[in-house]
Structure formats: structure tokens, C-alpha cells
Amino acid sequence: MDPVSLGLAIALFTLLGLAAGVGTGLAPGLHVNNVAVLLLASRPAFEALVVAVFPAAGPDETVAVLSSFVMGTVMGHSFLDFVPSVYLGAPDEKTALGVLPGHRMLLAGEGHLAVRLAAAGALFGVGLSVLLLVPLRLFLGSPVDAYERAKGGIAFVLIGIEVLLILSEKERRVRGRAGRERVVASRARQRAVAGLLFLASGALGFALLDTPWLTGWNWFPLGPLSDDFGTLVLFPLFTGLFGFGTLALSSRSRAVVPPQDLGAKAGLARRPLARGVLSGSVAGALVSWLPGLSSGAATALAQLLSRGRGDESHPDAQKEFMLALGSVSTATSVFTVAVLFIIDRARSGAAVAIRALSAGSVPPWEPVSAPPGLLLVLVASAVLAALVAYPVTIRCSRLAARRIHRVRYDLLARGILALLAVLILVLAGAAGLMIAVVAGVLGLGAPFAGVKRVHLMGCLIVPVVLLYLGLA
């Protein structure tokens, strides 16, 4: 297959994957893993399609083309997922912590700006992650070999990250009728509540991830539609922890979403702009090689690195955090795929699919001056998909922003709650719905106590820590 034909094939299937990612990103409850599982299950049909369109494609070239489809899906989902997370409050793992800032901006008439900032952060995150690939390779592989050196201390790294998150909590203040602020909860109390939420969510995560409790039985109204772990457990878990609480509180309000200002400006100086993008990309690089810390944990770390670690209600903090959120989303996607070639560890569903397409192994990135051809294909695919996904995201957000204010938000929130409940029941079954309800009750603790919802990420961190300490 000549280089021009191979390039056309990669571009075509990248865009086809992007279209699939747009669909999964806009539909609450669908995940990239759903498409990856479908691709692997229907691999002969996809390979036949590649050969039918490009008859000269050999086995290695077919793998590259199908892998570019996966990468396009990942990028499309990473961009378009911001639209439902801001306008509908339906998060997945990587956007879960962005629901509250995006929700606040929506109620301030800046929902479109929130999506624009996240999409811009995602676009810059792809570019920055590409620039950081070689430093990441030098850090994880030779000469530093950080992965091999850190294996024994991974549990303590995870514990240290959570300690920093807990210590970032401040005293809770409320503004009285006279305009004066008063302290209603001390810093020590807030930190204690944060720690309790972390442990409680960790206990729930352990029960779901490491034991058959609550998932040992199930009933599906339409029969099992997927055996993907992300659909059966993570979707209801994160929807409950981060989506149900926000929507439940909104459903009690009679407020109407104000008309959205489509021309709202970010008004951020260059320094916070750069800090938001850089914090997200660096956080993605730091956690892309750690087990159990995917994009959701990278978002939490970015919250510490960006201004979001301070007053979350401050408009500039919200805007900077949305930039960081976007950067985390795409940077983590790129880094986790690169990590597959550096340390031969699949830390994401996309990486698992790419390794499966490559017959269970990928060529190692060794030496640093000779990156594997498949990795170069995937990087090019990510860049192409990001460049196309950005304007598509802005267009979809503009359409949503023009219509969202025409309905009462309490009724919309109730409708979305019902829709998510039905989706969970259909996709994850009765056990999934029970998971979402239990997680939703726990998720209400953070807004009621006035602490960051980042501590609810203990649902993933605690099981991994226990595993590495040999306690699970």
C-alpha cells in the first residue's frame, strides 16, 4: 500500500471514528469503551470494510487503519462529552469534576463559554501532549526508568495525592443579609468531612470493584446489551456520585436557565490561560502511567495545580478549571496510548483495544529516537480528529445554548434524572440503578457540607491503594 493511499485510509477511518465519538459523547451513558468493544467483536467485518475500500491494505496497515478509528473515537468523545456535562449534568469519569463549575456557568448565562473553554483546553491539550511525548518517554523509560523505580511506592503516591486534596479544603463561609461573611464551618471540620467522604466513596468503590457485592446479580429489561465494566459499574457509579446530586438539587429549584450569552468572552489573562492548559496536560502525564488513576483522577490533580484549588465559585477560577478540564481530557487520552508503547501497560479502554488489534502486543518505543510507526499514526490521527472535533463541539454547544433557556430547569433536571435512570436500567440493569441511587445519596454529602467533590474520587483510589498494599 503506497504512502498516499495509507494516509487517505488513516484519515478516512479517523473521521469515521470521530463520527462515532461524537455520538457517544453527546449521548449520556455511552462510552468510548462501548465502541471499542463493538469494534473488537466485529473485527472481521471492519477488516473486510478496510480491504473493500483499500484492496492493497496488508495486515499491518489494516491494524494501523483500525487503530486510527479507535483514536478518532476517543478524540470525538473527549470533545463532545463537554456538551451534555455542562447542559445536562450527565458526567463520565473525566468530566465528573467539571459538572459543578460548568453548572454554575450555565446558570450565569455562560454555558456556551464553559464548553468553548473546555474545547479550547482540549485542543491545546492535544498539542501540548504531543510536545511532551518525548519527555514522558525519557521519564518512564530509559534513562530515568521512573515506572520501574516507582512500582513499590505507587500506593503511597496515591495516598499523598489525596492528602494534598484534603489539606486544600478551607473554612466554609456564608454571606448574610447585611453582606457580611461569617464562618459556619472551620477548616478542621471541612477537612474531616472531606476525609470521611473519601473513605466512604472508597468503601463503595471497593465493594463494587473488588467484591461481587451489589453486582453479583442483575436484571435487564431488554436483556444484557454489554458486558463492558465501564457501562455496568462505572457509568452508574459516576452518574450517581457526580450527576444525580447536582440534578436533584436543581430539580428543587424553580429557577429557569437564563438566556445564554453566545458572545461571552473569557476575560482571562495569558497566565491563567496557560496555567489551565498546562495543569491539565501535566496532570494527564503524571497519572497516565499509574494504575487506577485515569482521566478522572487527572482532573482532580489539575484542580490542585490550577486556580480551581481555591475558591471554586470565583468566575475566573471556574473558567481556568474548565480549560484544565478540557486539557486533561485529551492529554490523558494521548498519554495513555503512548504509555502502551513505553511500558507496555494499557491504562485505558482505547489502549486495550489498540493492543488487542495488534495481536496482544505493540512495538516498544526503543530507542527514543525511533518511535514506532503505529504510534506516529495514532498521534497524527489524534491531531486530525482534534482539529475537526473542535468546531463540531462549538456548533453543537451553540445549538444547545439557543434552546436551553426555553424550558424551566427544574423540569429539565427532573426529565434528565428520569432519562439517566432509564439509561442506567437499560444499560447497567437493576444492579446498576441501585449503584446509582446509593452513589447519589453519598454524592449529596459534598455540596451539603460545602467541600469539593474531588474527594469522591476515592471510589477508584482506595481500591487501588488496598491492592498495592496487599490488603485486597
Image (cartoon, rainbow, N blue to C red):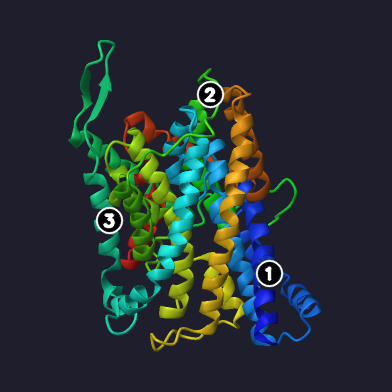
Discs 2, 1 touching: Cβ within 8 Å: no
Q: Residue at x 33, y 74 (%)?
A: 135
Q: Residue at x 61, y 73 (%)?
A: 67
Residue under label 2, please give it. Answer: 258
Pointer 1 local density, CA inside 10 Å: few below 14, some 14–19, many at least 20: many
Q: Amino acid at mark 2?
A: Pro
Which element is circle 3 on? helix
The residue lying furthest to the right in this view is 52
In this view, the residue in front, 269 or 408, is: 269
Can you see residue 77? yes
Q: Amino acid at mark 3?
A: Ile
Can you see residue 218? no
In this view, the residue in front, 205 or 415, is: 415
The location of residue 268, given as percent across then percent down, is: 35, 42
Left or right of 324, for residue 398 = right
Left or right of 58, for residue 239 = left
Cα distance, mark 2 to mark 3?
A: 38 Å
Residue under label 1, please give it. Answer: 13
Q: Earlier in the sequence, mark 3 or mark 1?
A: 1
Q: Residue at x 21, y 32 (%)?
A: 171
Q: Nearer the viewer, mark 2 or mark 3?
A: 2
Q: Amino acid at mark 1?
A: Phe
The location of residue 399, given as percent across then percent down, is: 64, 38
Is 107 located above or below residue 433 in the figure? above
Q: Nearer the viewer, mark 3 or mark 1?
A: 1
Please give the label number shown on residue 306: none
Q: Quadrant of residue 398?
A: top right
Q: Earlier in the sequence, mark 2 or mark 3?
A: 3
Q: Earlier in the sequence, mark 2 or mark 1?
A: 1
Pointer 3 local density, CA inside 10 Å: few below 14, some 14–19, many at least 20: some
